[in-house]
Amino acid sequence: MSASCLASTGTSFIDDGAIDGKIRTVYYDVENTYQKDQGVKPYRDGAWTGGLLVNVRSGYLGDMFAIGGSFYGAAKINYDKDRFKDSYQLLKTGKNGKQEGFSKLGQAWFELKCEQEGNPFSGRLKVGRQELYTGLVSSSGSRTVPSTWEGVNLNTKLYETQFKFAYVNKMSLRNEDDFNKIENFDGRKIDYILAAELSHTFDLPNHQSLELKYRNAFSKSFLQAHNAEVNWKTPLSDSTSLRLGGMVFYTKEDGNLWTGEVFGKKSFDDKATAGNLNATLSVGSWSFDTAVSTFKAESKTHKFRSDSSQYAAPSVYYYDLGKNTHGIWGMPTSPFAEDMLYDGETVWMVGFGYDFTKLGAKGLEAGYGYYSGSGMKVYDRQGGSKKVSENEHDVWVKYAFLQTVLKGLVFKLHYGIYRNDKELMKAIDKEENDLRVWLDYNFVIF
């Protein structure tokens, strides 16, 4: 580390410390209606929970060294065991399947920083328990508390080129109170995951920009995954801009820990690819989105959900890195109720969003998306196949309170209606109405 990174200031380690966090309440009601034509009452997953996140960090000692940590707590406000099958990862699953609140030390880390004004290079190395988004390794913040990893994360920048690297070997999921080894779907240990990311943004004439990004992840003896992404942005007028993008994903087996099955579903045998083209047109307060994706995740065998199942579902693309992990996906054609990533599937998406600021409701945003997937096949027990399709309607609302007393309070609602052909519905036992609501209060103590 260069001498310019070693200047000491002493008291800033305490004086520049900070305590902040979030109080959250979450309600999920995920209704599966696939047997409604048989007069069977829909089963539901979900709960109403409360969460507390408290983050504590020091300032930098010598403008170089800092420590920090986070406490997470999840509490059960309402869970009707006669109505819900489980809490959909909002609560911990205890003995006999009981859904329980929990608490944990979600983050505990130290950080080394090398940043100097005027120096084109900067870097930060964080070691320990931490939220992490590097390469194709991801945390998740959509439940009561976030998921976090245990490992090392390096984030560097040289001029406009950014490089990230991560090594992780344990994870605490969003409904766990401890850190566990990474596992495959047979319960065998995955020793570690390595991930890297390289990105550069080019500033072009006439206020245009071009972003190039490459990301990967290597889950030892399990999978290796790669992603390349390009985004081009250009203004069309003072209030109008256009973004065009494309991405490619490629995943292949990396050893004997890959079994080709994930959560009772059949995934690809040895390799899979996914490609996407997308565009966003921003016009004043409006944004309009469209995208198309294709998937190839071939399997020579098929899996029936039960002995009575009439059809086997198509094999699926898999983007996580172990049974108890999260992987970065971000495919614009994946809605939030159903991923839509079957082998042979082509998915189209159109949507829009609106910012109500100009109508006098600053902080209020809303939008809608429609997703349609087709071209994949289900298989019967006689070896035959039939092409099937699926679709989803999503609506969302977000309101950030700006009033002095309520500043820091954010409301979000997502509602998805997922439907499919009867043959696909019988193969996956799923047709869903998905309601998710969050109310967050972000606070700063000092």
Image (cartoon, grey):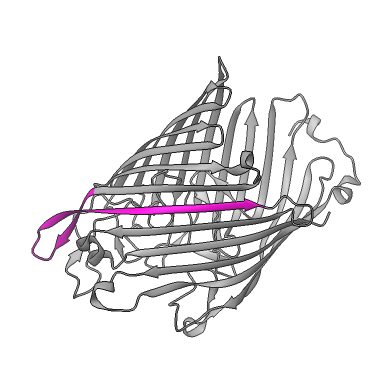
Q: Residue furthest right?
A: 11
The mark tally for this picture is 0
Q: What residue range appears in magenta?
A: 375-400
Please tell me which residue lies in front, 217 or 176: 176
Residue 299 visible in image = yes
Question: Which image quarter holds the N terminus?
Answer: top right
Q: Is residue 231 magenta?
A: no
Q: Quadrant of residue 440?
A: bottom right
Please tell me which residue lies in front, 101 or 108: 101
Q: Residue at x 56, y 15 (%)?
A: 206
Q: Residue furthest top?
A: 205
Q: Position of residue 255 (x, y in %)?
A: 35, 53
Q: Position of residue 337 (x, y in %)?
A: 41, 58
Q: Is residue 392 magenta?
A: yes
On the picture, is 32 further left or further right than 28? left
Q: Residue at x 67, y 44 (%)?
A: 125
Q: Residue at x 24, y 48 (%)?
A: 374
On the picture, is 231 further left or further right than 106? left
Q: Quadrant of residue 164?
A: top right
Please tell me which residue lies in front, 174 or 256: 174
Please tell me which residue lies in front, 322 or 368: 368
Question: Which image quarter holds the C terminus?
Answer: bottom right
Q: Position of residue 141 (x, y in %)?
A: 57, 57
Q: Residue at x 41, y 51 (%)?
A: 335
Q: Position of residue 357 (x, y in %)?
A: 63, 41
> Against 391, is 212 above or below?
above
> Against 279, is 88 above or below?
below
Give the overall secondary structure of the magenta segment: strand
Residue 69 visible in image = no
